[in-house]
Amino acid sequence: MSGYIEAGYAVVLGSLALYGSSLLLRERSARRRAEDAGGAEDRWEPPRQEQ
Amino acid sequence: MTRRGRPALALDLLGVIGVVGLAVTVWLGLWVTPPDRFMGNLVRLLYIHPPVAWVMYIAYGLSFLASVLYLWPRTRDLRFDRLAGSSAEVGVVFTGLTLVSGSIWGRPTWGTWWTWDPLLTTTALLFVLYLGYLALRRVPGEPATRARRSAIGALVAFLDLPIVYFSVDWWRSLHQAPTVTVGRTYVHGSMAWTLLLGFVSMTALFFWLVGHRYRLAALVDAEEDLALSAAVAERRAEVSDYLPDGGVPHPADGEPVAVAVGVGAGTAADAPGTGSRSPAVAAGGEAGLAGTRQR
Amino acid sequence: MWRDAALVAGKDLRIELRSKVAVNQVIPFALVVVVLFGLAIGQSVSGRGVAEETGLANAGVLRGAAAGLFWVAVLLSTVLAVQRSFAVENADGARDGLRLSGLDPGGVFLGKAGATALQLLVLEVLVAAAAALVYGVHPAGLGLIVATCLFATAGLVFLGTTYGMLSSGSRVRETLLPLLFFPVAAPVLLGATKAFDAAIAGTPGAGRGWLELLVVFALAYGALGTAVFGSLLEDA
């Protein structure tokens, strides 16, 4: 009976930890790529009007 | 938004609250609180399963709100679309976890891994529903088009939620009264506090995850924009190679020109906050033109 | 708006009358599905003697499930019908023509939905007859059955046309439309099946609540589709 409880906790918390760390890793690599490419990280400038 | 500005600190704070809160919840839930009179030790899953389900509803509600805000002309901003997508993705994760934790609870309680009770069935439908929404978001296209399409998709999906819930509920009535909306009146003392802590921690964790997912989306969009500008610059360089000097209209201050290269470099309908393309294009464009002129 | 709807519906129906795709492909598809369900679920008798009317050992199962199987077949056919409805717009820049024609987008939505609904209703009559025959069901409560068909079809078609427009511009539309459509259509499947069950069992009163659900669904998605079709048309 108790095995289910531990399994439940482990699955939920483990999955959240997995997802969270994958987000952090992808964010770090995306940030590195953006910096390499030209450093336009999270800068938001309104697009100027096209001619 | 600078790297270490206030939003970033708030995000970190949320993460800390979430993780620490969860850790305490686990400690309380597994060891400190007593077993329930009726359910025995199974009540310990109650500290995890309803909070996860509750977060799922927040996620989809937030996604719906953000989609509505995007569609409303006065608040049209691609950032809302990004928020809708991030919230929905995290929501799908939590939906999957709701299904799994509900199933794990069901096995010892009712003897089977799956029961067709209303909440579980509704959750299963929601899972597939929002997987479809995420698939819709991935369909390529102009940012504005993609955002509008996704927002409408979110409306269609969200409109279905109450209908699905009521229909499935009429169909089956095994499940106990929803513990998320109606407080369980016989949960008291340390159990009640642990449950509350579970809700708070999961919610904090949810917002932390959405924040990071949002940032990731923003970075990916910025990267796309840069690749786009680089491609436009390359094309302009190619074109200016073949035309005599002055054949290509020369933008005085480095503004990107609407050259017919088939690259939809944004229309007037584009929302503000799409990300900067002009500086990179200007740099590339100038380099290309300068190279020609020196010949 | 209604006049535009009638115009568009007329156009779609005329195309169908000339090309006969629904008649030649979608209806046979639905009939095949009905038979396939019988193959999948029905168990044959071992030994001689016919246990039940239709010759299958678990004919009772098939008979009990007949309503649900019918509606699953209808749902599958709806996806095909909607895809066909938008495929006719892909040829020769017809969609641009639609956009520039100055027709009210809500009217276009209702017109396309209406045409598809009409085709589906014809399909339903034929498939219901086939299902009643093959699954050994004795229809009753005709009023409830007809009302259910009308409102369920309306809801499905409103939803399908909205999603069809949403996915019509993309290259992955064949797989995207079913994925989007089926989860949202689930309540219609549930409600229509339960209403049919009530009608067949001879207790139409029990089906009234489900019919109301179908009406709500149809109204909700009819309204939503009419409202958003304009922007979807612009984007395609």
Image (cartoon, coloured by chain):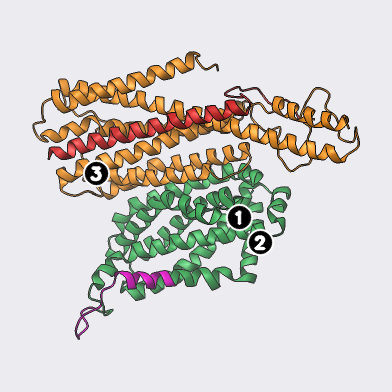
Cα distance in 3D space between marks 2 and 1: 9 Å
Chain A rendering hue: red
CB under 8 Å between callouts 2 and 3?
no
* Residue type at the position of mark 1: Gly
Look at the image and give the residue range highlighted in magenta. Answer: C32-52
Q: Colour of chain C?
A: green
Chain under numbered label 3: B
The residue lying furthest to the left in this view is B37
Please state if C74 lies on the left or on the right of C197 as rendered: right
- Residue C111's label in the rendered image is 1
Do the numbered discs 2 and 1 sit on residues whose CB atoms are within 8 Å? Answer: yes
- Residue B103: assigned label: 3
**Residue type at numbered disc 2:** Lys
Q: Helix, strand, or loop for circle 2?
A: helix
Q: Looking at the image, is mark 2 or mark 3 nearer the viewer?
A: 3
x and y, in percent, of residue C222 in the image: 52, 48
In-image side of B26 versus C125 (left or right): left
What is the C-alpha distance between the residues marked 3 and 1?
A: 45 Å
In the image, which lettered chain appears orange?
Answer: B
- In this view of the protein, can residue B69 be seen by the observer? no
Q: Nearer the viewer, residue B203 or C31?
A: B203
